[in-house]
Image (cartoon, rainbow, N blue to C red):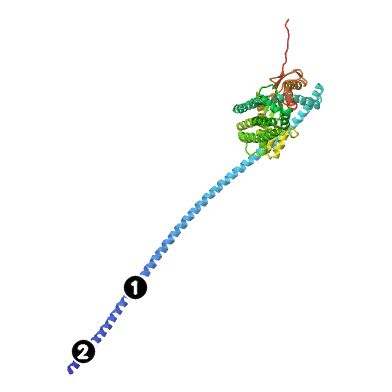
Amino acid sequence: MSTGIAILLCVVALVLGAGISGVICFKSGVNYRKKTAEAAMGSAEKEAERIVDDAKKTAETLKKEALVEAKDEIHKSRQETEKELKERRIEVSRQERRIQQKEESIDKKLDNLEKKEEALQQKLKSADDKMAEADRIKKSQLDMLEKISQFTVDQAKDYLLKQLDEDLVHEKAIRVSNYETQVKEECDAKARQYVSLAIARCAADQVSETAVSVVPLPNDDMKGRIIGREGRNIRTIETLTGVDLIIDDTPEAITISCFDQVRREIARIALEKLIQDGRIHPTRIEEMVDKARREVELKIKQEGERAVLETNVHGLNHELVKLLGRLRFRTSYRQNVLNHSIEVAHLAGMMASELGVDANLARRAGLLHDIGKALSYEIEGSHVQIGVDVCKKYKESADVIHAIEAHHGDVETRTVVAALVQAADAISAARPGARSENYENYIKRLQKLEEICTSYDGVEKSFAIQAGREVRIMIQPEKINDEKMVLVAREIAKRIEDEMDYPGQIKVNLIRESRVVEYAK
């Protein structure tokens, strides 16, 4: 027990000793660190003071350098400014010298202008004096001329103007004649080219239509059956169709005569059907005539459609197409009017294509130009006016209506299409074999042509040649000079156009000849 206490006491003593020694050591360590820290702080303060001193010295140095550099910059700027000012002063002085020189030059010019103005005033005064003197001389000369010529000034002016008018008329006539000759030659050449091309490309029949139709019979006994008992069958046929049946000694044939081709065609078809049927009596005749009339109406429609397709004209009113078909049974101087219209449409279209004009419009106007002939015996008025009214009724264009109105020269042509239709109509009607004319009318036309030409004063003789297509007029040279020949020729041509109807055109030739005959004895 005592041993354990002793040990415990020993242990406690040891612990207390160790604690005291530890405290002592701690205090000594703290004092050492304190001294060490104070020493470090002292050295740091010294270092800081040294750094501050160095910084102050560096700042002083930089400040001095900056002041030096600023002084250098200021010095340089001052030198440059002074240099620039010096240059500007030099330039200003140069400009001042130039301005001064210009002012001196202007002063000199003003002095010269004043001198020139004075000289000009003197010249003007001298010119006025000379003009006054010239007027006096002119007046004296005019007085002298009036005394010598016994003409006043107004009379002399009238005389000179009259002479000038005569010279101008002569010169104008010569120029007009030359210009017309040149234009005619050029136009004739072009027209011949276009017309020849159109004619060469258009092929048409030259066979004239006839005013009779011949119906063949199987035998001569059929003539008696067609005549019927006491002529009742033939009377019925003639009454229903409006034609004349000519039954003569011609073997196995009956002739149907009528200037209306529609009636003649109806009678021909009816007779052919009666001959084929064999039953010929009034009732059967009426039935066949009705059938034939329906067939002809259908044929009229088909002919109109054929003409439209052949000429490539579209958009026509169906009534106009029927009227075109009726032209198939109309003739003009024995020329079929529908074939003539188709030919005119082709010719006008081809000439329009050559000239660069609307070919479709030209073909349309050419096809419809004689449409009035389909109704000319039903409505009063010329076929031109009837055609115009019909086309207006069915809303045709103004160009087509004008071409129809002008194709016979009733009105002056205002469009190229109208002129082409007029030319194509003349070509189609005037070509050889297209139309026939009886001898009496032909002689009357030639006589009328020569009468118109010889009715003018100064015309000695006139001769119609080339079937009336040309007239040659012999002029009395003492009454009509070369200048007046142009006017006389134009007047004669105009009168022929107004007073005569003729196909194509008529060439008027005036011939003036002076002969001097002397005999040496």
* Element assignment for label 1: helix
Answer left or right for 151 relative to 324: right
Q: Nearer the viewer, residue 158 or 59?
A: 158
Q: In this view, does 383 lie above or below 66?
A: above
Residue highlighted by disc 2 = 11
Q: Where is residue 317 in the image (x, y as percent from the top left)?
A: 66, 39
Q: Position of residue 304 (x, y in %)?
A: 64, 35
Of the 4 image quadrants, the one containing the N terminus is: bottom left
Which residue sits furthest bottom?
2
Question: Does the rendering let one see residue 211?
Answer: no
Q: Relative to the observer, which residue lies in front, 208 or 453?
A: 208
Camera-nearest residue between 89 and 291 = 291
Instruction: Provide the residue designation for mark 1.
Output: 46
In which quadrant is the C terminus drawn?
A: top right
Residue sitting nearer the eye, 516 or 223: 223
Q: How far apart are marks 1 and 2 (CA)?
A: 52 Å
Q: In this view, does 379 lie to the left or right of 47?
A: right
Residue at 26 percent across and 85 percent down: it is 23
Which residue type carries mark 1? Lys
